[in-house]
């Protein structure tokens, strides 16, 4: 399946994500995300880490949308380093951890005590001169 948009209600919030590609198998689902970033090969692990929350958000969306699946594979494919494909498999316990993580994040947002993650500002579209424009 090519580009796949998921919209769903979760904890009284509307979540939306567009995933590059999803393969639906009998016992699991594979999410494929293509990245076009230019960076030095030595920074690959840092780059993967930078995308961790986005990848976990995709896992949350897919696990909520396809309720019966208990195993989700995620392939992170950097176009500039096709020999460095990153494959992560999330089992039920991991999926539950991710679900709880986002419940906590949403609760903090609702209560007005969500702290900004300033580590990624220089790559974020909500930054100007590398500073957050969100009040
Ligand atoms: S610019 Fe703002 S929204 Fe973007 S990563 Fe930084 S703190 Fe978060």
Image (spheres, rainbow, N blue to C red):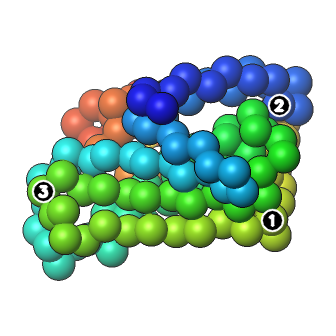
Residue 29 % position (x, y): 62, 50
Give left or right: position of 62 versus 34: right
Q: Which residue is mark 3?
A: 80
Give left or right: position of 92 versus 53: right
Earlier in the chain: of badge 1 and badge 3, it is 3
Q: Nearer the viewer, mark 1 or mark 2?
A: 1
Residue 116 % position (x, y): 56, 47
Q: Which residue is mark 2?
A: 10
Give left or right: position of 65 versus 119: right
Judge whether residue 116 can be spotted in this image. no
Q: Secondary structure at mark 3?
A: loop
Distance between the alpha carbons at the discs numbered 3 and 2: 35 Å
Residue in the image at 34% along x and 30% along y: 125
Distance between the alpha carbons at the discs numbered 1 and 3: 32 Å
Rendered-image quarter of ligand 1 = top left
Q: Is residue 29 above or below residue 85?
A: above
């Amino acid at each position: 399946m090519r580009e796949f948009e998921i919209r769903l209600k979760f904890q009284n919030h509307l979540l939306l994500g567009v995933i590059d590609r999803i393969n639906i198998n009998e016992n699991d689902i594979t999410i494929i995300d293509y990245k076009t970033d230019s960076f030095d090969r030595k920074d690959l692990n840092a780059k993967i880490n930078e995308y961790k929350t986005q990848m976990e958000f995709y896992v949350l969306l897919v696990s909520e949308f396809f309720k019966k699946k208990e195993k989700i594979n995620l392939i992170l494919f950097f176009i500039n380093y096709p020999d460095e494909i990153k494959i992560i498999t999330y089992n039920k316990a991991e999926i539950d951890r991710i679900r709880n993580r986002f419940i906590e994040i949403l609760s903090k947002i609702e209560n007005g005590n969500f702290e900004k993650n300033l580590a990624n500002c220089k790559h974020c579209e909500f930054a100007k001169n590398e500073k957050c424009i969100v009040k």
